Amino acid sequence: MLKEFALDPELLSNWKDFRFFASQFGVSQGRVISRFPGDWQERVKRAAGNAKEVEFLKIVEALLRIESSMFIRDFDYEKGHQWIRNAVEENQKRPFHAIVSSATHKDASNVLIGGDIDPTDPPNLWIVQTSIRINRTPDEMAACVQDLLSQCDEVLFIDPYFGPGKSKCTEPLKKFLEAVARRGSRRMPSRIEYHLGNQDKDLVTFKLRLDERVKPHLPKNTRMLLVRWNKDQMHNRYILTDRGGVMFGQGLDMADGSFAVTHDTVSLLDQDTCISLLEDYSSQSKKLTWLNEIVAVG
């Protein structure tokens, strides 16, 4: 659901243009800015070096706020070449959804001219979906959140009816965890949690099933905490991260059986909603009753 854009730092040389592009990116909007190259933010500052002092300071402060809109990738970059040439060459190896610059390039068909982008009449490459319908299969469920899970440092899976003894629950979780681990040279998440209801009363069997069906699929050198809540206080299903979140309308389990709902709608959450939900699923929650029932695996 997330689309990665290579954005030419030179396009953000003044506050007016910076503000426009910054407003168009963010996980909730489905567009993320590639941190290409690694010093992208410093390049923006250099591009804005001739701006008035007040404008420059606004840009510097705003660069901190768009940190969560940045997409980290492994890349190649020739320092002696112009940014656009590097972006096109990188695009040929590991494609961006689009390259946004001030000029087209003969070797790339997915270049957008920054000054021509009109949100009221956007080019096709600028249009992204913030909600999609998927088949409730482990592969499709994981594919729609792959980029989010590969970038995050913290992730909370939330489904009141998760049970480690049910294949319909553990098979999608395996794929989600594979997506978490698929992050190149980036470090593994510091926090992985699954928040669920407390309907399983046999905790001995509960822990045994976790060791059998979940532990082998955890990314290397990580562990997951299972946080149990009163299931009657839970309803919606989410994947929440420090980068943003999504809501699964039906659940984080796959369809099984002839009468199962075979499709689901997955929607990106706006940032404030995601932050609020992260607070709800914490020990300081004001919406849910903290039971302090935590099981660790890994």
Image (tube, rainbow, N blue to C red):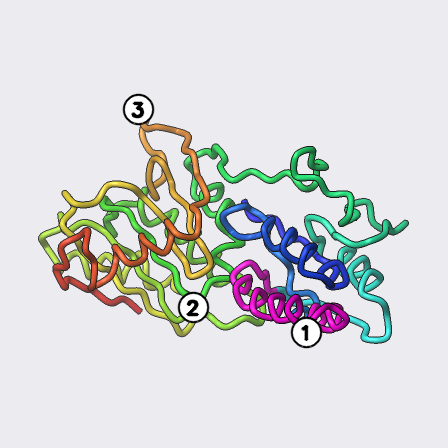
| The C terminus: image quadrant | bottom left
Judge whether 184 appears above or below 111 on screen.
below
| The N terminus: image quadrant | top right
Residue to which mark 1 is pinned = 42
Mark seen at residue 165: none
For residue 253, side relative to residue 88 (left or right) = left
| 1 or 3: mark nearer the eye | 1
Name the residue: 61% across, 71% down: 57
Residue to which mark 3 is pinned = 259
Going by the numbered disc 3, the residue's amino acid type is: Phe
Q: Nearer the viewer, residue 63 or 211?
A: 63
Residue to which mark 2 is pinned = 189
The magenta stretch spans residue 87: no
**How far across and how far down the image is residue 191, in percent?**
36, 67
Ranked by sequence position, the earlier of labels 1 and 3 is 1
Whether pointer 3 and pointer 2 mark residues with C-beta atoms closer than 8 Å, the reply is no
> Which region shows up in magenta?
43-72
Name the residue: 69% across, 65% down: 36
Ranked by sequence position, the earlier of labels 1 and 2 is 1
For residue 292, side relative to residue 145 (left or right) = left
Q: Residues within 10 Å of mark 2 (few under 14, many from 20)?
A: some
